[in-house]
Amino acid sequence: MNLLFDGICDVFLFKLASKIKINVLMNKFSKIIATLSFVAATLMSLSASAQSDTATGTSNATVITPISVSAGNDLEFGSFAVDGSTAGTITQAGATTGGVTAASGGTTRSAATFSVSGNGSTPYTFTLPSTATLSDGASHNMTATLSFASGNASRTLSSGAETVTINGSLAVAANQTVGSYTGTYDVTVSY
């Protein structure tokens, strides 16, 4: 019986010791989990603040002189005669084709000029229509083809100013009605 009692006691003590070990281990495990959770939370908060940074940006602006344009010389084709049966052309320099003959005297022929002013050596665009209509005021018209004497629409101011010269070629119909013709055209400058 003693043996039986000793055996029961051994089993009981073994189970009791196992439970105590499990409780001790569980208690230690809980403490380890709590410690790891605290460490992880601390590292995450440090990590979040370590990802932040600040920089300062700069804003700049420059106000420049407005661009402007004003008309100088008019585009003058002068006086000319036209053969009744042959159309032709005349330029502001007096060159003719077809049935057109330049006359001496009268209005002096000239290219048109425009004065452009603005900011320093700034690039700009000079917009020129391709044609202008001249009329005698009584439903008789002629068309002048316009062109730059030099360069093109993309230009650059030199020391804040430039004179732009415009040439023209006037188409004259056969039997063009005699009279004084005039017309206008608009140019535009922009940065």
Image (tube, helix red, strand yellow):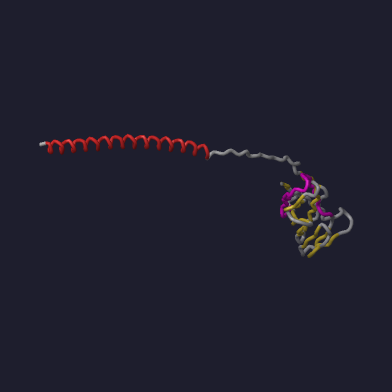
Who is closer to the viewer here, 28 or 183? 28
In the image, is residue 117 part of the stretch drawn in magenta? Answer: yes
**Rendering coords of residue 72 (x, y %):** 82, 48
Q: Is residue 43 left or right of residue 33?
A: right
Rendered residue at 87%/54% (across/down): 108
- Please state the extent of the stretch shown in magenta in the rendering: 110-132
Name the foreground residue: 34 vs 97.
34
Quarter of the rendering containing residue 141: bottom right
Residue drawn 25% across and 36% down? 19
Relative to 34, say whether 181 is above or below: below
Split into 4 quadrants, where in the image is the N terminus?
top left
Q: Looking at the image, which is closer to me, 73 or 89?
A: 73
Q: Residue at x 24, y 36 (%)?
A: 17
Extreme residue in the front direction = 2
Q: Nearer the viewer, residue 63 or 128?
A: 63
Determine if the magenta segment contains residue 178.
no
Residue for point 60% across, 39% down: 55
Horizontal side of residue 147 vs 27, given as left or right:
right
Q: Position of residue 45 (x, y in %)?
A: 48, 36
Does 30 sit left or right of 171 as displayed? left
Expressed as whole percent of the image width and height from the top left, the position of residue 181 reads 79, 52
Give above or below for 167 relative to 16. Answer: below
Which percent across, then down, holds residue 185? Answer: 74, 49
Q: How many marks?
A: 0
Residue extending furthest toward the right: 105
